[in-house]
Amino acid sequence: MAKLTFFGAAGCVTGSKYLVEAAGKRLLVDCGIFQGTQELQDRNYKPLPVDPKTIDYQVLTHAHLDHSGWLPVLVKSGYRGPIYANPATIELTTILLKDSAHLQEEDLLHARIHQDSHHADPQPLYTTEDVDPALKLIKSMPRSGAFDISPEFRITSYDAGHILGSSSLELTITEGGKKIVVVFSGDVGRYNQPILKDPATPPSKADVLICESTYGDRDHPEGDAAELLAQIVNRVVKRGGSIVIPSFAIGRTQTFMYYLRQLEDQQRVRIVPVYVDSPMAISATDLYVKHNEDHDLEFTREEGSDGKGDPLNVHEFHLTRSVEESKAINNVKTPCIIISASGMVSGGRVLHHLAQRLPDARNAVILAGFQAEGTRGRALQEGAKSLKLYGQDVPVLAEIIPMGQFSAHAGKSELLRWLTALPAPPRQTYLTHGEPAAAQALQAAIQQKFQWKAAVARYLDTVPIGE
């Protein structure tokens, strides 16, 4: 009998890994790292309960590290099968994994110099040398439509509207002459957002649905995102301050650049230097322009009939690739905007910018995405008066501005809208990718609105999917 095991994203938002077993074969859907609390991060160093050598196939819904970032560990542990992803996801995953390994090596060096790790002998999860063996196993699958992984597994992809290449997957399992349909929502994006197409609900009569619940307990704040951003920029610039935007390099950075370019063109904000201080974000932005198959009609129109327009190119644009260029931003004493990873302030160059800018009340920090439990971003969101950066307590005097309008995740009502489009009730729904309160709230909403069977997935639980 076919079965499914939740190796991650159960009871928490990160670490997406789902093992499907059917007809004597094993398929792993997503392979992400855990982020957030120390307890969650420590899971990254634990082996899978099954031997990776016994897994036959692997497929990705999209490139974010909480869906792809454990691939080098999987391969280092013995996995040798194919890793399937669409072309945009392959290119983004390549950038992300290389950057992740580099940051881990930098963090390790810093921890050993400053002796500020809680481990006696800190080690990176993987190094740059571990990334290439994983990348060599990645094989392309179509952006949309059906694709046969094997006689047992057929995947059909639908645009999830979350980031470039993001997909919801319909998995059709053939076992014992019967077919079982399992739908994985992946991360569902927002409706009516710039750049990307709206999320598409698979038109599947699913036996089992695995649905994310990141914002299952709330909707995003209302309000015109462009107008709110204009008000912030004008207010901070007027008082002589700068804005730091901890931003996910893929998705959020490009959305900010799009809105800033619009506001500048409409003369609704003063033009100030915009520093995109993330080599990965720079590379990802190039891919956003390249992969026009994911663009919505408005973005396509702004690119022009020749496809050469660039709606992401703000007027005073500075791309900083080197460490020296990044450090030089410290010398900028006039108003500017700094966009830098990571989005949850869990690492990356943004730490160094926050250490410089948080103690000045003229400055502002915009928190634009989900801030997982245990991250510095969550601490700022909840009103922390100081933040530990590089072993030092940095006072938080800058204005902290949460902006849920820029989230790339569907809010509660958008998730229900996505579910409403399913042509028939699934026999069973499992809620993943949510902290307990969010997943339980969405479970209650589904039961009330649709009268479906819905359960909150539990870490390491195995459930039958072929009954």
Image: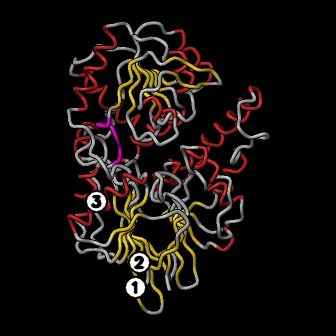
- Residue at left 53%, top 43%? 36
**Figure quadrant of the C terminus:** bottom left
Image position of 178 (left or right of 31): left
Q: Residues within 10 Å of mark 2 (few under 14, many from 20)?
A: many
> Looking at the image, is mark 2 or mark 3 earlier in the sequence?
2
**Residue type at tag 3:** Ala
Where disc 3 sits, the SS reads loop
Dot 2 corresponds to which residue?
172
Q: Are marks 1 and 3 in contact (CB under 8 Å)?
A: no
Which residue is at the far bottom?
A: 177
Q: Are marks 2 and 3 in contact (CB under 8 Å)?
A: no
**Mark 1, residue position:** 179
Q: CA distance from mark 1 to mark 3?
A: 23 Å
Q: Could you say where residue 459 lies in the image, as x and y percent from the top left?
A: 53, 62
Does residue 151 sit above or below 453 in this rendering? below
- Which secondary structure, mark 1? strand
State the residue at coordinates (57%, 32%). Answer: 348
Q: CA distance from mark 1 to mark 2?
A: 6 Å
Q: Which residues are magenta?
A: 404-409
The residue tagged with tag 2: helix, strand or loop?
strand
Spatial separation of the CA atoms under disc 2 and disc 3: 18 Å
Dot 2 amino acid type: Thr
**Residue at horizontal 24 percent and vertical 29 percent from the top:** 226
Q: Which residue, given by chain and number where applicable, does mark 3 sit on?
A: 200
Residue 73 numbered mark, or none: none
